[in-house]
Image (spheres, rainbow, N blue to C red):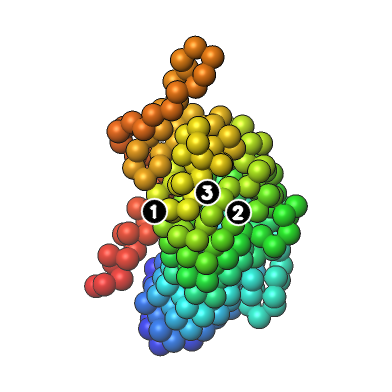
Amino acid sequence: MAFPHKERDVGGRCFNSLQILFIGVCPNLESLMEGMRSFTALRTLIIAECPRLSSLPKHLPALENLIIGDCESLDLGNRNGEKEGNIQGFGSLRNLYISELPKLEILPRWLFQVPTSNNLLYLSIDNCENFRALSEEEESLSLTSLDTLVIKDCSELLALPEGMGHLTALRQLQIERCDNLAALPEKMRRLTALTQLKIEGCPKLAERCKPRTGEDWNKIAHVKDIYLNGQKIQVRKSGLDDEAAAGTSGEPQMEFPGVVLQLYFISLFDSVF
């Protein structure tokens, strides 16, 4: 379902059985009204190419998948005009994909509040030119169920917080083309569930993560599968010492929830016609 280009707001209608909603290429859409409270069964919301949209709805209790792309005015901390509004509104959210949001500098606080913080499994931040930090408060990074974190093309990101150590369920971490990211936090050592780490196009970080010689190597040496710029790092024990070598095994792809990805591309295709 897509809304017409001239629609200035969305809501006020009863769609209490609707499970999937795509809103795309709506240059005049400015808000998603409180009428969306009637979308009580909505599980997947995709918003793309809505340059005037400035806020998200406050209350979508069943929402599990949220994909947002190319919305230049959108402030994720603005919930229908109220900064950090009803934090309980996305309590079922499991998968969040964010792309091309120039106003995004830091992840919104509501993301780290219960129950959202307990349910989120997948988080991807892609091509957000002003994104500079996951969280301003290190202790607030309490996404206790997060399985996969992907950060791509965020040139203003300078560091990952020590609060990363709270992501105890994190299994996959992918960082690509973050040119100014210079080091990993000390508390990376706490991520004992982390089995897959991919670093691509991050020259400063890749240098520090070189096996044995890199300053950050000891922070990640426990990770089973490490990929640096397309090469799998293989660590073999030789006597009492570890021997590290770059392999040529194929790179992994982080496990984006398949149904969400399919819906995204289907919706984009349909919006052209």
Q: Give me the C-alpha separation between circle 2 and circle 1.
A: 16 Å
Where disc 2 sits, the SS reads loop
Nearer to me, 261 or 17? 261
- Residue at left 56%, top 42%? 215
What label does residue 151 carry, if any? none
Q: Is residue 233 above or below residue 137?
A: above
Q: Position of residue 46 (x, y in %)?
A: 45, 64
- Quarter of the picture holding the N terminus: bottom left
Q: Position of residue 6 (x, y in %)?
A: 40, 87
Residue occupying the point 71% across, 67% down: 86
The first of marks 2 and 1 along the sequence is 2
**Left-right relation of 79 to 101:** right
**Callouts 3 and 1 close, C-beta under 8 Å:** no
Disc 2 to disc 3, how far (Cα)? 12 Å
Mark 3, other Cα within 10 Å: few <14 / some 14–19 / many ≥20: many
Sequence-wise, the earlier of marks 3 and 1 is 3
Identify the residue at image location x=75%, y=52%.
139
Quadrant position of the C terminus in the picture: bottom left
Outermost residue toward the left in this view: 273
Q: Amino acid at mark 1?
A: Gly
The image shows residue 242, relative to residue 217, as above or below, that is above
Residue 31 in picture, x, y percent from top left: 55, 80
Residue beneath disc 3: 149
Which residue position holds label 1?
201
Q: Secondary structure at mark 3?
A: strand
- The residue labelled by disc 2 is 160
Report the amino acid beneath label 2.
Answer: Leu
